[in-house]
Amino acid sequence: MGPKRTNWKRRRPYQHRRPSDSVSAQTSNAGCSSSSSAAAASSSSSSSSSSVPELPGFYYDPEKNRYFRMLPGHNNCNPLTKEMLQRKQMELERLKMLKEEENRIKSTRPGLNASMLVLKRSVGMIPSTTYCRRMHELKMSCMMSRKVHIDCPEEGVETGQHPFELMLADSNYKSVFTVNDADNGFCKFGLLSLNGLWKESPTVKSYDTPYFANQKVNAACWATMTATDSHILVCHQGKQESPGCVSLIPACLLKNMEANSDGRPELFYKVKISNTWSCAWSYYPYQTNNYAVGLRQQILLVNIVKNFRQAFKTESDVLAQQFATQSGLLYNGGRSGEVFAVDLRLPSNPFSWKKAISFHHRCSISSLRLLQDENYLMVSDMSGKIKLWDIRNVRPVKHYEGHNNSYALLPLHVKEDEGLLLAVGQDCYTRIWNLEDTRLLRTIPSPHPASKDSIPNVVFSPYLGGKHQMVPGLLMAVEKELYHFSYNFKKS
C-alpha cells in the first residue's frame, strides 16, 4: 500500500496559514547561528507578512491573523463587504492624516525657511519671482484650518442648512458664487462676501436670495457685461418635464439690489438649451458678449447682444471649455479624450470646419486651464492624469502625479504667480503641486468622512476678500460648513 493521502477538502479557506508562519518555521528549524543570517531571516519574514495572498471572496484581517468570507454587496444582511472595508480603511487613513495636520511644522523642502530665503534675496542669489514662489510654498505648507461662520443679514433665516454643490470666486476674490442643494431636488443660488475673513473668528456674509431651480447645475462661470464680474452664466441640466437652459444672472440680484451703481437695470438672460455639459465666457477683445456651451456632440457659440448663434458639430460630447484671451481660439475637451481648438476668426459652417489644434488623452477630459503664456495648456482627465501641454509642439512637457479621479468633472486651479497647482480628487483629498518641478507639496484631508456626495469645493488666493485685505489661504466648502486654511506665520 502507498502513502496515505491528505484530505485537502477538510481544510477551510479562512484557516489558511500565513506565509510568514512557514517562513519563520523554516528559519527556526534551520538553526542559523550567525547574527547576519538571523537578521536576514527576520527581514524576509516581515516582508512576507506584509504581502499576504488575496483569496477570491475572502478578506484577511491582520489583527486577528485570519481570513473572513465576504458576501455580495447587494446582500443587506451581510455585515462585511468589499466596499465597506475600503471605506473603513480610507476613514482610518483620513483620521491619521488629520492628527498629523494638527502638529504640522515641517516645510516641503529640506532647509527651506523664511530667514534663509530673505538672506538669499538680499545678496541676490535668487530672483524676485523665485523668492515670492518659495515664500508662498513655505506658508502653504504650514496652513492651519479654522472654521468659518456664515452670517446672514436677513432676519429669521437659518444659515448653513443646505450642502454646498458648487463654489466659484470672482476675479477679485471679494465674492463667491455658491450653489446649494435644497430640498426636493431644488438648488439654491447665493453669494458669499469674504470681507470678514481677516477677523480672529473668520466670518462670511451670505445673501439670501429667492432664486431656486429644480434642475441640477452642470457648469457655471463669471461673465462681464456692464462691468467686471457683473453676471454669472449658469447651465442647467434638463429633465423629462423641463428641458435644460442657460441663464445669465446679474450678481446684484443675488445681493437683493435692483440696479447697479450707474442706475441702469441689469440684463437677465435665459434661453432653452438642452444637454449642456460645460460653458465658457469670452474675454477676447474682438469677441465681446460671447459665450460658448459644450453640448452633446456639438459646440454652440452665442452672442447675447446681437442674438447670433453659431454651431460646430463634434464627434463626442464637450465636457470642458476655455477661451483664449490673446487669440480667437476656443479650446475644448471631449468625452473621447480629445483636446481641440476652434479658430473663431475663420468662416465655417456646422459640418465643415477645421480644428486648429488637436491631441488626445486616453480618457475623457475633465478640466482645461490656459496659462498666462497661452502656448501652454493644463489638462486633466478622468483617469487622474494631469499634464501640461506645449501647444506649439503638441506634446506634454510636465506630468503631475497623485490626482484621483475616475468619472467626475473636477476642476483645476492654476496659480501661476504663486507657482502652485491645486486639484480636489474624487477621494476628497485636496492636493497642491509645485507648478515648475511637479513636486507634490501637500495633501489635505477632508474635515468630513469621504464620500462621492461630499467632494470639497475650494478657492485659493493670497487676496481672499480683496487686495486691500490680503487674507491669504484656502477656502474649503464641505457639506454645510466652510473652512479657511490660513497661512500660519508663527510656525513658518
Image (tube, grey):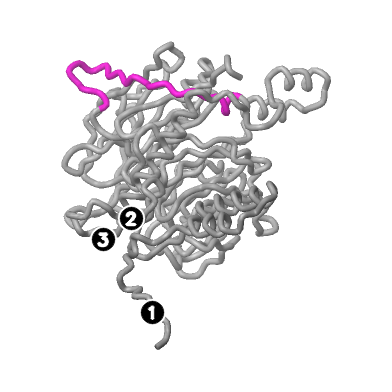
Q: Is residue 450 visible?
A: yes
Whether residue 390 is visible, yes or no, is no
Q: Mark 2 = which residue?
A: 82
Rounded to the nearest whole Å, what is the CA distance between mark 1 and mark 2? 36 Å
Using the image, determine if residue 324 lies above or below residue 9: above
Identified by mark 3, the residue type is: Leu
Q: Is residue 31 above or below residue 444?
A: below
Return the mark for residue 71.
3
Vertical relation: 200 (above or below) 84: above
What kind of element bears circle 2? Answer: helix
Q: Quadrant of residue 133?
A: top right
Is residue 183 found left or right of 391 in the rendered image?
left
Residue 454 x %, y %: 33, 40
Residue 148 within the segment the image draws in magenta: yes
Q: Quadrant of residue 196?
A: top left
**Residue 238 lies in the magenta stretch:** no
Image quadrant in which the N terminus is located:
bottom left
Q: Position of residue 129 (x, y in %)?
A: 71, 29
Give the magenta-colored segment's residue range. 139-160
Name the N-terminal-most of marks 3 and 2.
Answer: 3
Find out whether the residues at labels 1 and 2 contact each other: C-beta distance under 8 Å. Answer: no
| Label 1 or label 2, whichever comes before in sequence order | 1
Residue at (42, 61) in percent of width and height? 54
| Mark positioned earlier in the residue sequence (3 or 1) | 1
Amino acid residing under circle 2: Lys
Q: Work out which quarter of the rendered image holds the C terminus and state it.
A: top right
Q: Are marks 3 and 2 in contact (CB under 8 Å)?
A: no
Per the image, the residue denoted by label 1 is 5
